[in-house]
Amino acid sequence: MEDNGFPALCLICFVSFMTINLVHGDLSYSFPEELNRGSIIGNVAKDLGLDLKEFSSRKARVDLEGPQKRFCDINMNNGELVTSEKIDRESICGKKPSCLLRIDLVLENPLELHRVSLHIQDINDNSPKFRVNLIEMEIRESAERGNHFPIEVAHDADVGQNAVQKYVLQKNDNFILAVNNNNVELVLENKLDREKQKEI
């Protein structure tokens, strides 16, 4: 019986070495979400040290990792990486604190592969919202000063410094607002008098 183990091992090693030799330096760019189509992300030709003639002759192209949507293209006239459509950070990364897309930049003759990391920065493009427009609470007239009454927090699709930063309570004679981490509460500062005021 013929042993084919050695040739197979050689083939695996050869393919692995070829793949390693094709991968070159990484590029990384950071830019805000919601840029208009055709906005410049960075000049990949310049960052790779290639003149435009060589860049064009080597048929530079963008390949995506997996079945992700195509968010950028290469302008072969100037070597710039540009947005192919508006990028909504929240639809891609949700509430994650960082949003990273990875693409491959491929050059031919000779074949080269460059990993490109795209860091999508959050902008304040969403308004905080409560689950309902009107929050109604029933509070006993006998409630004591200092009693706390929780309120459902507002939700904001943005993250970090663009998320909900503060709450403001309309001035009144009975309640103040207490905010602690993600908890929002009304605090009774002065006793309620139903005969004077039924609703606040």
Image (cartoon, grey):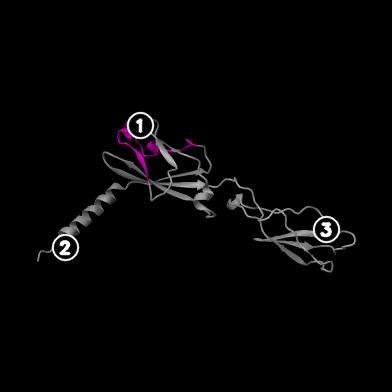
The amino acid type, in three-letter code, at marker 3 is Glu
Which residue of the protein is positioned furthest toward the left in this rendering? Answer: 1
Q: Secondary structure at mark 2?
A: helix
Dividing the picture into quarters, in which one does residue 6 lie?
bottom left
User: Quick check: marks 3 and 2 in contact, CB under 8 Å?
Assistant: no
Tell me if mark 3 has few (under 14), some (14-19) or many (20+) residues whose alpha carbon lies within 10 angstroms of its own: few
Q: Is residue 98 visible?
A: no
Mark 2 or mark 1, which is nearer the start of the sequence?
A: 2
Q: How many marks?
A: 3
Horizontal side of 128 relative to 106 (left or right) equals: right
Q: Secondary structure at mark 3?
A: loop
Q: Which residues are magenta?
A: 37-63
Q: Which residue is mark 1?
A: 52
Task: Say which quadrant the C terminus sits in.
Answer: bottom right
Horizontal side of 117 relative to 108 (left or right) equals: right
Q: Residue at x 39, y 30 (%)?
A: 77
The amino acid type, in three-letter code, at marker 2 is Gly
Q: Nearer the viewer, residue 188 or 160?
A: 188
Q: Position of residue 21 (x, y in %)?
A: 27, 48
Q: Nearer the viewer, residue 12 or 30?
A: 12
Q: Residue at x 75, y 66 (%)?
A: 148
Tell me if mark 2 has few (under 14), some (14-19) or many (20+) residues whose alpha carbon lies within 10 angstroms of its own: few
Q: Position of residue 128 (x, y in %)?
A: 64, 51
Horizontal side of 165 relative to 80 (left or right) equals: right
Q: Which residue is mark 3?
A: 199
Residue 5: give its label.
2
Mark 3 or mark 1, which is nearer the start of the sequence?
A: 1
